[in-house]
Amino acid sequence: MSSHSCSLLFPVEEDHDYTMSDYEGAQARWCPGCGDHSVLTAAQRLLAAEQLKPEETVFVSGIGCSSRFPHYLSTYGFHGLHGRALPVATGVKLNRPDLHVFVVMGDGDCTSIGAGHWMHATRYNVDMVALMLDNNIYGLTKMQTSPTTPQGYASNTQPLGSYLPALNPIEATLGITNASFVAQTAEWMPAHLYATLEAAYQHKGFAFVRILQRCPVFTGDLYQDAVRNPDMIEMLEHPDGIEVPDLHQIYQNVARHDPRNMDAARELAEKTDRIRVGVFFRDESRPRYEETRHLPLHTTGEKIEILNDELDKYAV
Amino acid sequence: MTSNSPMTDTATEERRTTGGVRVIQDHQHIVEIVSDSGEGAQKCGQIFGSVSAKMGNGVWTVEIIPAEIQPPARSPAGASGNRIRIGTEEVTNWGDRTNVCVAFNEQVLIARHRLDGLASDATLLVENMWKDHRDEDIRAEWAAAMEELSAGGYRIVEVPMEEQCLTVVDNARKGKNMFALGMLCWIFDRDLDLAKEQIAHAFRKKSEEVYDKNVKLLELGYAWADEHLEVRVDVPTKHSPDDMVVMNGNQAIAFGAVAAGMELAAMYPITPATSVSHQLGEIFHKFGGVVHQAEDEIAAAGVAIGASYSGKVAFTITSGPGLALKTEFLGLAIMSEIPLVVVDVQRGGPSTGLPTKVEQSDLLATIFGQPGDAPHVVMAPATIEGCFHAIVTARRIAETFRTVVVVLTDANLATGVQPFPRPTLDPAWMGTRPDMSPVPEGKRPYEWDPNTGLSQRFIPGQPGGMHTLTGLAHDEDSHVAYASAINQLSSAMRSRKLAVLQSTMQPPKVNGPDSGDLLVVGWGSTKGAIEEAVANARAEGLAVSSLHIRFLSPLEPGLKEIFQRFRKVMTVEINYSDDPGEPYITEENRRRGQLAWLLRANTLVDVDCWTRVLGEPLRPGVIQDVIRTHMPKKGGAA
């Protein structure tokens, strides 16, 4: 991991061409206090730190509040369909492994309407960063229950409270064959958020990051206790995962967790006593689909020659 | 059905005798091989078709496919095999009724009889092991079937296939197909060396021993026929001056995609489209191409769109139910002007419908399926050769017009095998690599030419072209449009492109005189059958012509003018329409064929239609009957 991960500041080395402001797009139109702002800032900081050329970077999103994300950046953006960001991103990366691909989805996108793609993108393990901005509610359509809404939490579609236990996206992702990077962070912990994004970017493979966040309008109360009481948080740290020592003073529950240990990762993901943030699992040795499928391109002349050979087999 | 087409049934033109064997001379003949699934009838049929093509016959082969992989043995519904129509001239369709049928049991044969698939004077070669089978029920089934068949007036020959094949192989189920091929080679005087070549090709992944046994069975069948059969058929061959290739429509699509420079095909398995990806799976990697089998139909569209967005045009392959699932993504591609080619190999519908059977029922859904106004291109090749070229054209249009092009084929083209002139490959078909040069300052991602609606797309990697593409209404900068006038403008720009495309087209050519009493209009795979029927009807003295439409959206120009030169215009299609005179059906509420619907709306001509959804290609003899009954009355109004 990198030296930037320990700092709460936004270090931009002098010889770098791009600064954070080079990645700014349209003025963000999210509500004041929305967690999306903090993720956007962390992403811009990461882009600057990694000096990613805006023209070689693509942010693909779905539909929902968080999916407006690409509009607020100056990279290439693809604001597509509800739940379908992952297949589009897969197509981009399959065709253009040279591009840096980021996916931004909400909990509705990822765990509900596009849940099938979530499972398969995890298994494809295409090298990209997938951010799931999880505010536990449908915000843009005004407060409907999502799969991650806590049981009993009232919404406009389930005013008597959500009927089922909330889906646990970390547990679910860890259960998918060929998962290679699974992390959780929270928007109210910007240093941790940044360190997680950075680790996700630097991971070769499909890096799934669930970002816990508050919707100030509809679920402002959900993480209020956790925001006020650092004791409810446990940071999973490891040199192979992330370490954010600057936060140790505030967040004193720090557990050493080797992200290669899948059994331990699954056990931690199941626990409900605290909110765990950090890298649950990471394994770069897993096959990456775009590499497995990569083939050298041919010139038109070569293709015509091969095609003629193939047609010979069908000659009358 | 009572077809009296001169091309079918009693089509023999001349009979002569040489050494006790009667030779029927005919300019076309239809042969079928039917068996239970897994008995190899299809392989036999394919080889027979290939050999005939190589000898210089026109050939059209269709598969007879049950819906299940292993349906119950000896069941009429399980009939599986091939139907091969050979001719002296080019064969453009599957024809009418079968003249020679080889059946591995009497139940699959009775299925063909009940479907009205056999000519009244057909020769039926049927495996006779069931006649004296130890199972009493089977013996009874045989007797009942034979009685039913005897009413048909066929020439039935009982053949001891099992007994003969057991002299070469232990399991006759694995050998009868080559024995049958041997019989057919004798009947049609096929070149046995060519047959052996094709056997070697068919079993190229198997051992030498397998090849040897199959050749032995071939020769055994040939010898048995020579000894026991009395009728041979001579369909004169005529070598084409052109180099020819022979394949089915799905293979032609696969080759067309390579010739079009495509590098990514995304698909999800669906009958009858999947075999495109099988063919691509065999060859695509040699060209650096990837067949991505996605987790579902939606993802297949998404991956193709993501690939297209980031470079060269990609394509996705599907059939009706899959097209329904892709609808939202196609709307996105149209809205955000991402070029994309979609192949829909139509099958019977709605819902799961008739997965293995032909239908042309996706037309309106393909054109109008996306909610909102989503103008895009829909085209339909009419021949197997057309499938190849359609993909090349589709890719070019998609790229030039920055839009979605749907290519509609169907199960008839997908599984029909026909020789056609070998395409002379043109490097220009492959297109060029996307321009990755920096975007000039101030140029916008949807800088629509106000006249044509065309604009240049920016591709990730192009400096200065950064923008966020969106399915939301957007302005020329690709910014979300909050002003209502922008939506009106962008809708007009997307729509304009179709008019511009249409302006580049010539009116379609009328087949036959360009005026007359009746014009039969078709689209897609029915072209061969319609034109054959029209030719025969004209030979009868009827003033009928036909018109085949390749572009359905935008429609080709000049249609109204052509229609007005005929007293009556009607479509013939493989989709559902109400027949006039049925209960409750009136002029006003009659649901018409899908092309008829389009043509009426676009030309205000009172276009009639005749359509059927029988799960099989239209027979030219049947279309000829339809022409006779739909001719406008002399002197009266059309």
Image (cartoon, coloured by chain):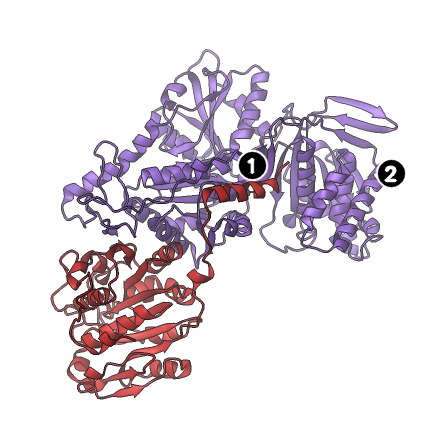
Chain colours: A red, B purple
Q: Nearer the viewer, mark 2 or mark 1?
A: 2
Q: Name the foreground residue: A284 vs B599.
A: A284
Residue B195: quarter of image: top right
Q: Which residue is mark 1?
A: B617
Q: Quadrant of the N terminus of chain B?
A: top right
Say what amino acid the circle numbered 1 marks: Pro
Q: Nearer the viewer, residue A90 or A140?
A: A90
Q: Amino acid at mark 2?
A: Glu
Task: Give how far across and how far down residue B634 sits, in percent.
Answer: 48, 13
As drawn, the residue found furthest toward the front would be A15
Residue at mark 2: B227
Relative vertical location of residue A159 with respect to residue B44 in this rendering, above or below: below
Note whether B44 is above or below A188 in the view shown.
Answer: above
Residue A101 appears in the figure:
yes
Residue A169 located left or right of residue B530: left
Q: CA distance from mark 2 to mark 1?
A: 37 Å
Place of residue B138 in the rendered image (x, y in percent of width and height, measured from the top left): 76, 53
Count of numbered labels shown in the rendering: 2
Left or right of residue A186: residue B88: right
